[in-house]
Amino acid sequence: MSKFRKKKKGMPGISTASLPDIVFMLLFFFMVTTVMRETDLKIKQTLPFATEVKKLERKSLVSYIYVGKSKVEGQGGDKIQLNDRISRVDDIKYFIFAERESHPEEEIPLLTTSIKADINSSVGTISDIKEELRNVNALKINYSTRKGDVSKNMK
Amino acid sequence: MARRELPEINAGSMADIAFLLLIFFLVTTTMDVDTGISRKLPEKQQDQDVPPPKLKEKNVFVVTVNRNNDIMIEGERFIQIDQLREEAIKFIDNGGGLGNPIDDAPAAECDWCEGTKDPASSDHPNKAIISLESNRGTNYGTYISVNNELVGAYTDLRNRLSKKLYNVSYTELLKQSKNDMQNESLKEKIKNIKGKYPQIISEQEPYK
């Protein structure tokens, strides 16, 4: 019996001293590869699929316009979300002006507006947004999509 | 001697702190890359009196999408989305006549086109215009699909031409150029191909 007990005592415990290092490594990985979530979506959204996509470089130059149905039940129609709240089409120009304000002058021609619209929104809403963007001369746009076959859009 | 008495700081909770930070970053950040179809909107016309340029009907490829998401081409034929790319390529690549003069050179035929040279279809890729009409009630998904197929038609043609001229696809050229911004010969090649198949897609104001 005494022999047995001795053996048990001799088992070394696994050292947890390197655990913080491992976790820190993970932490740094996530800090480097991800970006802060900027807005809380107030609308329901599934992006459409496309194959001819381009990556958006330099996220600081991109401003987002979200389009979709409201998450609150009973509110029909497409809603436009700018920053953190649901807005009207007329507000887009102020949004763009505010966006331009926060960038140095030489970057203004590079500013891109990304339209993140729900797959089931109507072209009319999108066209209103585009018209508004043309009015303030924000001509570079990007229809945000996921990568995938277009046949998935037709359902 | 008194130094020896100093107790060591317990680092056991370090892992917990790190985990806490890790979880905080996991929750507040996103990893998704933004991809999408890039477009340039036409500038607002200052002068309303400028007459629109005269276009021959055969040089315009009309794609109409109605509120039931049906796709019609040239105002006469209903097609499915998977046929659209093929039809667009056939139209752009037709090369049935003389093109717009490039760099003061006299108007010439399209000698890189592989189309059927049908005189009733487009004259030249730089004259071929795709006009997209949509309804306000059209589904955005369908609209994106149509846009995607039209851009795809140009990409296919450019890839084909680039393979023929330089043995690499156009997409590959773009990728190389992005990694090597200073390379002028690459830029020249891209410009050449873009000039041979310019992407001319015009969007009409959606009708009600």
Image (spheres, coloured by chain):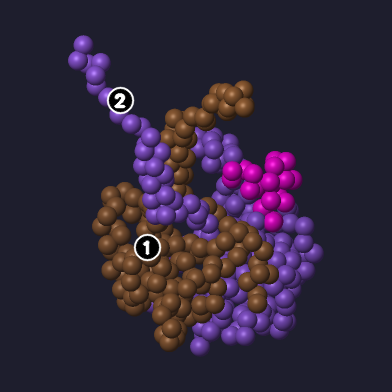
- Figure chain in purple: B
- Residue at mark 1 shares a chain with residue at mark 2: no
User: Which secondary structure class fits the magenta region best?
Assistant: helix
Q: Nearer the viewer, mark 1 or mark 2?
A: 2
- Is A18 drawn above or below residue A64 in the view shown? above
Q: Chain of mark 1?
A: A
Q: Residue furthest left?
A: B2
- Is B204 drawn above or below residue B201 in the view shown? below
| Residue holding disc 2 | B8
Q: Position of residue A30 (x, y in %)?
A: 45, 44
Q: Position of residue B55 (x, y in %)?
A: 59, 73
Near-viewer residue (A129 or A20): A20
Seen in the image, is B202 located left or right of residue A105? right
- Is B144 drawn above or below residue A148 in the view shown? below
Q: Position of residue A5 (x, y in %)?
A: 58, 27
* Label 1 environment density (alpha carbons within 10 Å; few <14, some 14–19, many ≥20): few
Specify the label residue B181 is tagged with.
none
Please name the color used to draw chain A.
brown
Quadrant of the image occupied by residue A71:
bottom left
The amino acid marked with disc number 1 is Thr
